[in-house]
Structures are given as C-alpha cells and as structure tokens.
Image (cartoon, rainbow, N blue to C red):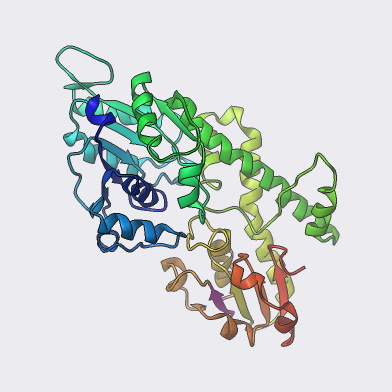
C-alpha cells in the first residue's frame, strides 16, 4: 500500500516507558507522529516537550521532535495511516493475563480504520493476542478483512515486541534487532518497512504467534537464570557463605556464567512475561513456573533477614535505599524493593522506615498511605538508622563509603552485593 510505505503518519497509543520512546524515535526519523494517551498530565507534558518519567536522552528527543512539529500528543484517536499499540499488559489474579488495555486500545482505533491501514501491537502479549486483536476489529468492522476480498477494505495487522533495557531504551530501540510477526506476510512486510526507517539492527520477519512467543521466551530465559542465582543465594545464606563470593568463584570455570542474586526480580517484563507462557501452556512449563516462584519468594527471604537482624528492638529506624526495580531508573513496576518496604511497614508497625529513592519525588500510593514510611534524603535516613537496607544499586549508593555508614553502629544488609 503506497500510503503505508511512502509517507505514513503514525499514532502511538500509550505514551509510557515504551510508547513515548517509540514515538520520539519515529518522529526524529522524519515521520509525523501523534501520541495518544488517556492521562491528561502525560499529554500535557509531551505537548510541552517534557517527559513524565526518567529515561536517559528521551527528553532531548521529545523536545526536538515537538519543536519541529513532528510529534504531537492528544487524548483522542486520530485518523492516520499506521496505529502502534503500546499499552500495558499486566496480569491479574492467579497470574492470568489482563488484556483490558489492549482491548480498549483496539476498540478506540476500530472506528477510524480504513482500507490500507497498518495496526502494530508492540505490547508484550500472551500467545494469540494479535489474533484476538484482529478478531475484535473484524467483528466490529465486517467491511474490513485481512486478505483481499471483494467488497471489503484490506487492513494489515502485525506484532513487533519491544526488546529494550530500561535506562538504555533510546539506544536499544535503534541498535537492537527487531522481530516482526504478521498475521499475513503482507502485514509483516509493511511493518518491517516501518521499523527499517530507524532500526540499525536486523528486522527479522516471522508470523505473529512466533513473534509473541519469542519475546516471552527471552524474558523467561532471564528469569530462570536469575532464579538459579537467587536459589544459590538462599542456600549460601542458610549455610553462612557469602553468595557473591561463592558465585564469583564458580564463574571462574570457563563454561559457567551465573548471574548476580538480588532481592527479587521486578519490572514489567521479566517478572510478568513468564506467566504469559504458563497461562498458554501450564502443563508444558513446570520449570518456568518454578523459577517464577523462586524469584517471587526472594523478597520474603530478605524480610526474614531484616526481622532476624532487628531482633526485639522496639521502635527500629530503618533506612531503605532504593525503591525502583533496577538501578538508575524511576520505574517501580513489580519492584521487589517496593514489596519489601511494604511488608516491613506492616510486619513492624512501630518501625520508622525512611526510603531513599533519588529518582522519584513522591511515594507510590500504597506506601504513602502507610504511617511509618516516608521519603527521605540519604544523609537524613542513614545518620541515626539502626539498620541500613540496600535494595537497589543506584549509582548514588555504589559511591558510598561503607566505613562512614558503620560509624553510627547501624547494621547493614546489602541485597545487591556492592558493599562487599
């Protein structure tokens, strides 16, 4: 379709951690982009050339694209050539996928679709979600079809999962290989044309179901390996062995490369995606499900260590360093650090927990509503603490002099192994 290939206009639905960077990269590569989000504050921020979250280099790209008129933001869905859906795909009770955001985004674009339009689902999704999206559109729009048919318009639908690391999104959107899976070969070809406009890596074409499962497999692989590291840490701590020293020694073997343990696994990808595989094939995925449970149990192990260290102290002062799910970002989704702080606030209601998270200005609602938790600065939190609990290895914490922290007699629990 000439309108898709030659001079597309793109709407990106969902201006979050993936949607906004994608919109910015498209716009800085000469494509007119309309960012769509239901959140008024997000739309206002992007329209003014600012960003609502921390991601290196993103604000520069957004500001430039907005000033050049290539990127705009609004709450209404426009009539464009290509629709990119980058909305959340969380899981609900019993780790079942919640596709309500995908359904809502699909329904919002359906009235606007015309002959020749391309729809791309970027949201990481359970197997079969792209086909579900297509069926939902076609049920509402019998005048459209996925293959040439007399009397109907032709639309193209594909899945292209993001494969980026928070903190490096603006680099990896351009340099990483991409996977494009179409419900038809023509749809995959049109999606490939779009991504090749900015992607310097390979753009690999497959079917939609394989593309969906490829992203889930990548993150399940990471989760299984992290589960092994965390289980070894559980064993080592039970036996009184330093887990980081143990793993560093084991990694001297030329064919061993164990990851570092931590307080758990967080983020919207690794902590969520393996459950999408399990929901699609529960009997065929016992290892993946076990790995998820190992990693989900790690925060509770850290909580037990804290309680054992505090003993019977009546009103302990705890400095909790870090709240995001990984270093040097502000993303708190599925964060084990956040879960640990919340558990401690409930289990030790007499504790005074000062949270130091340099990348946020206010606590999330589940912690802000807790009377014994407050957001604090580093010096204030640590100067009179009974226990200093390192949960995230932010650069600010990596540079600390541990000797200074010990001067006031505080106990130290380092869940990241950076103060060894």
Q: Quadrant of residue 245?
A: bottom right
Q: Residue at x 19, y 32 (%)?
A: 113
Relative placement, left or right, of 291 versus 217 is: right
Counting labels gives: 0
Q: Position of residue 223 (x, y in %)?
A: 62, 44
Whether the magenta-drawn stretch holds residue 2 is answered as no
Q: Where is residue 155 in the image (x, y as percent from the top left)?
A: 25, 25
Viewer-side residue, 183 vs 167? 167
Q: Is residue 364 visible?
A: yes
Relative placement, left or right, of 380 versus 21 is: right
Q: What stretch is highlighted in magenta?
A: 349-356
Q: Quadrant of residue 248?
A: bottom right
Quadrant for the N terminus in the image: top left
Q: Residue at x 68, y 82 (%)?
A: 386
Residue placed furthest toward the top: 150
Viewer-side residue, 308 vs 254? 254
Give the answer, above or below, for where 127 lies relative to 145. Answer: below
Give the answer, above or below, for where 179 lies relative to 303. Answer: above
Q: Position of residue 63 (x, y in %)?
A: 32, 60
Residue placed furthest toward the left: 151
Q: Residue at x 18, y 29 (%)?
A: 114
Viewer-side residue, 321 vs 35? 35
Q: In which quarter of the image is residue 410?
A: bottom right
Relative placement, left or right, of 296 versus 196 is: right
Whether the magenta-drawn stretch holds residue 350 is answered as yes
Magenta-highlighted stretch: main secondary structure? strand
Give the answer, above or below, for where 310 lies relative to 104. Answer: below
Q: Can residue 311 be seen in this view?
A: no
Quadrant for the C terminus in the image: bottom right
Q: Residue at x 42, y 35 (%)?
A: 160
């Amino acid at each position: 379709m000439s309108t898709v290939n030659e001079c597309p206009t793109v709407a990106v639905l969902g201006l979050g951690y993936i949607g906004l960077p994608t919109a910015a990269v498209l716009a800085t590569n000469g494509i007119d982009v309309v960012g769509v989000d239901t959140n008024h504050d997000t739309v206002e921020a992007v329209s003014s050339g600012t960003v609502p979250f921390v991601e290196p280099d993103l604000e520069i790209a957004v500001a430039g694209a907005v000033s050049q008129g290539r990127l705009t933001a609004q709450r209404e869905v426009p009539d464009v050539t290509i629709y990119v859906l980058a909305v959340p795909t969380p899981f609900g009770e019993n780790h079942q996928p919640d596709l309500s955001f995908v359904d809502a985004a699909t329904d919002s674009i359906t009235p606007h679709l015309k002959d020749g339009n391309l729809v791309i689902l970027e949201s990481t999704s359970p197997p079969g979600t792209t086909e579900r999206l297509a069926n939902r559109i076609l049920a509402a729009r019998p005048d459209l079809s996925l293959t040439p048919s007399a009397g109907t318009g032709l639309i193209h639908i594909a899945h292209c999962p993001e494969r980026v690391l928070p903190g490096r999104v603006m680099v990896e959107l351009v340099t990483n290989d991409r996977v494009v899976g179409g419900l038809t070969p023509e749809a995959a070809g049109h999606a490939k044309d779009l991504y090749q406009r900015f992607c310097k890596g390979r753009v690999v074409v497959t079917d939609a179901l394989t593309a969906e499962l490829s992203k889930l497999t990548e993150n399940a692989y990471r989760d299984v390996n992290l589960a092994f590291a965390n289980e070894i840490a559980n064993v080592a701590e039970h036996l009184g062995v330093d887990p980081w020293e143990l793993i560093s020694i084991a990694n001297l073997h030329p064919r061993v490369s164990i990851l570092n343990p931590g307080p758990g696994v967080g983020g919207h990808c690794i902590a969520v995606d393996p459950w999408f595989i399990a929901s699609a094939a529960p009997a065929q995925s016992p290892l993946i499900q076990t790995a998820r449970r190992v990693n989900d149990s790690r925060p509770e192990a850290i909580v037990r260590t804290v309680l054992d260290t505090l003993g019977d102290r009546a009103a302990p002062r705890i400095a909790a360093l870090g709240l995001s799910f990984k270093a040097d970002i502000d993303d708190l989704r599925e964060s084990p650090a956040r879960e640990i702080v919340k558990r401690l606030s409930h289990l030790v209601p007499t504790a005074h927990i000062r949270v130091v998270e340099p990348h946020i200005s206010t606590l999330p609602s589940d912690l802000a509503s807790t009377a014994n938790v407050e957001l604090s600065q580093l010096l204030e939190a640590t100067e009179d603490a009974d226990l200093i609990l390192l949960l995230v290895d932010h650069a600010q914490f990596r540079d600390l002099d541990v000797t200074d922290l010990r001067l006031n007699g505080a106990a130290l629990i380092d869940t990241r192994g950076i103060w060894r």
